[in-house]
Image (cartoon, helix red, strand yellow):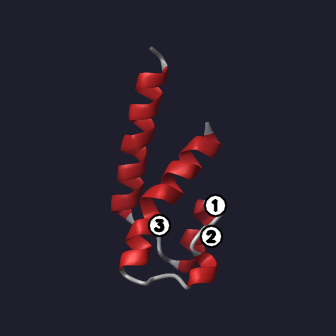
Amino acid sequence: MKAIYTALLILAIEPLLLAINALPKSLLIPTETRTLRWFGYISLFAICYSQTLLSFFIHHSKV
């Protein structure tokens, strides 16, 4: 489950970072949210968005 959450978080954050050119191209695919926090690029919007996606995935996978 942690891997799914991390993947969703990366998918949610990467477009935002690309749009504002916040990260150099060599850092576009962080492996952990820790990496993003270390660089100071964690976004509340991205976290909320990824949690919404995760909730949706969990809800629909129980069917």
**Label 2 SS:** helix
Q: What's the mark number on residue 32?
A: 1
Asked if residue 44 lies left or right of residue 6, the reply is left
Residue shown at 47%/75% (left/top)?
41
Percent position of residue 26, x then y? 63, 81
Q: Which residue is mark 3?
A: 14
Foreground disc of the pair 3, 2: 3
Percent position of residue 2, x then y? 62, 42
Q: CA distance from mark 2 to mark 1?
A: 6 Å
Percent position of residue 8, x then y? 50, 49
Q: What's the mark number on residue 35?
A: 2
Looking at the rendering, which quadrant does residue 43 occupy?
Answer: bottom left
Indicate the amino acid at tag 2.
Thr
**Picture layout, residue 42 above or below residue 9:** below
Looking at the rendering, which quadrant does residue 57 occupy?
Answer: top left
Residue shown at 55%/85% (left/top)?
24
**Label 1 SS:** loop
Residue shown at 45%/63% (left/top)?
13
Indicate the amino acid at tag 1.
Glu
Quarter of the image for the C terminus: give it: top left
Say whether marks 2 and 1 touch (CB < 8 Å): yes
**Picture layout, residue 21 above or below residue 4:** below
Q: What's the mark number on residue 53?
A: none
Indicate the amino acid at tag 3.
Glu
**Label 3 SS:** helix
**Label 3 crowd (10 A; few <14 / some 14-19 / many >=20):** some
